[in-house]
Every structure is written in structure tokens, then in C-alpha cells.
Amino acid sequence: MRTIPLLFALTALGAAPVAAQDPAPTSQSQIVVTAQRSGAPMWFIETPTGTVILVGEIRAVPKSTPWFPDRLEEATEEADRVIIRARPKFSPGDVLRLIFRGGSFTKLPDGSVAADYLDAAQRARLAALEAEYDKDYDRGSFLMTSFDLLARRLDFDDETTDDATEVVKDAADDADIPIIRPERFRGEDLLDNLAEADPRSHIPCLEAAMSATEAGPDIIEKRGADWRRYDVPAVMENPLEIALGQCWPWADDELGEEIRGQWVSMIADASEQSGVTVAVVPLRVLAETDGVLDQLEAQGFPIGGPNWR
């Protein structure tokens, strides 16, 4: 059962007219309008031959958030290609490694305890949460403690609707639309990266998870509402979004840089293709400082859509 939070972590952006001699059932501009009507925040890169639609995804959209996935599905069915996130590639051997090395992921090393790494104020905050939830986090790895706080105490992923990635993937499968994904990380590399990490590298994640849990469940609804209002800076400043972005693998310097580089490369490649590309990108990767949108803008891509700063 102790491996469940880890598995949660690993599973953890005017169009050119269609030529008159070759009419299409839906024009590029119509696809863009249909996608916009879904209510998800999105950005557009227009080129002489096509349009790239960047859908800013947040995970675990609350059911109370009034967005319309069916309209994004409809737009996807008329697109020429889609880009969605990849899942890590785990082999049976990687699963065995997780079982036999589980202690290196779930516990602090060498019999150490939280107070060996945290300052007095940080340990006092953790102690207050231990008392509130009747949990003992003293020996647990800070990453696993963070995921427990977010997924089980704050319960941020309960009562949710489909993520944009799920909507686009299902629509693309049904309509035989080509699906492009980032190159998948090998499970072995991810597990080694995680096992070798200094516990201190996960303290920012723990602090952010404690802040989100202390703020309480209202931040879940607010995050969804701000996402639907296209208030991207407010979403990025939400304690829950901050916590998700502060935790592994996003906050890992090596993995995080590679993830962002993959997205920029795939979107740049798509901009050279004809027709419409629908790309579903994690909002925190799109809109963070020096994130995908900033990098694309620095490369000279014209980006239309809501303010992300």
C-alpha cells in the first residue's frame, strides 16, 4: 500500500483558409471557435499553413467547474493531429525494483527522521498536521508525505471530471486522428532519479503541500473557477497548483528541463505542419516563468490567447 502515492506521482498550450479547390467539412477557424467554446483556457499559434491550439490543462478538474468537454472533443475530431502527454514506460522489472527498493522511496534514509532535515518552524507545521490527521510522518520521505497530504488529506482529486488529455485522446482514437506524444522516460531512469535524490530536495514540495493542506478544500474549487475564467495568474498562484508544480518530477532540475524541452520541440515541429494541431499541455508547464509559452514567444512565435503572466 505504501507504493500507491508513488504511482500517483508517476502517472503525476485568423487561421489560414482552406483551399477552395479542396473543401473540408470544417475550416480551421471553425475548429478554433469550437475548441474555445469548451471553456478551457487555450492559446493559438497561427502560421501560413495551419494553426496550433495549446490547451492549458489542470489535472483533477472539479465536477463543479462549468466547462464543456464535448466541444473540445468535437474540435479534436476535426483536427489533423493531436499532441498529448506520455506516461512513463514501466517494465515488469521496474515493478520488481519498486517492490524491493520501496523503502528507499517511502522512508527517510539511514534511520533519519524529519527533524534531521527540517527547521523548527517546518517541523512544528508538520507536527500540527500529524495531530490533525492522526498520522505519523516522522520517518516518511518528504515526497510521499507531500502526496499523502495532497491526495488523501486535502483530497484534491476527488469528485472530478475528465481531464482535457483524456477527452482529446478518446476523441482522437475514435476519429483515427494521429496522436503524438513526448518520448517516454524509462521507468528505471525515473526510479533511479527518485532513489538518488537528497531528501532536502523535496522540502520545497513538502512546504507547498503543507500550505495547500492548511489552506483547506476551498482552494480546489477556486482553482477550477479561475481556470474556467481564464485567470491564469490566479491559477498559478493557487496553493494547490504551486504544490503540484513544486513536487517531483516537475521540480527536478534534470527531469523538469527535459519535459519542458520536449513540449517546446513538439509544438515548434507542429507549427511547420499544415492543418490544425490540438496540443494539451499542463498549464503549469505552459504558463510558469520561462515555461513553454515564454520559450515559444522568445523564439518569435506569435501567440494569441489569455494573459499568462
Image (cartoon, rainbow, N blue to C red):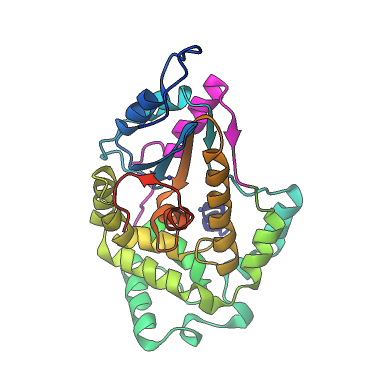
**x, y (%) of residue 265?**
57, 49
Instruction: Check residue 156 for magenta coloring.
Output: yes
Instruction: Check residue 83 for magenta coloring.
Output: no
The reply to whether residue 11 is in sight is no
The reply to whether residue 246 is in sight is yes
Q: Residue at the spot x=56%, y=38% of the render?
A: 272
Looking at the image, residue 172 sits to the left or right of residue 209; the answer is right
**Residue furthest out toward the right:** 93
Q: Quadrant location of residue 98?
A: bottom right
For the record, the magenta segment spans 154-182
Indicate the quadrant containing the C terminus: top left, top right, bottom left or bottom right: bottom left
**x, y (%) of residue 103?**
63, 68
Q: Residue at the spot x=59%, y=37% of the render?
A: 180
Vertical relation: 234 (above or below) 74: below
- Total tally of numbered discs in the picture: 0
Vertical relation: 87 (above or below) 136: above
**x, y (%) of residue 97?**
72, 59
Q: Residue at the spot x=64%, y=64% of the render?
A: 102
Vertical relation: 131 (above or below) 91: below
Q: Quadrant location of residue 1?
A: bottom right
Looking at the image, residue 55 sits to the left or right of residue 265; the answer is left
**x, y (%) of residue 22?**
51, 13
- Please tell me which residue lies in front, 225 or 181: 181
- Please tell me which residue lies in front, 191 or 114: 191
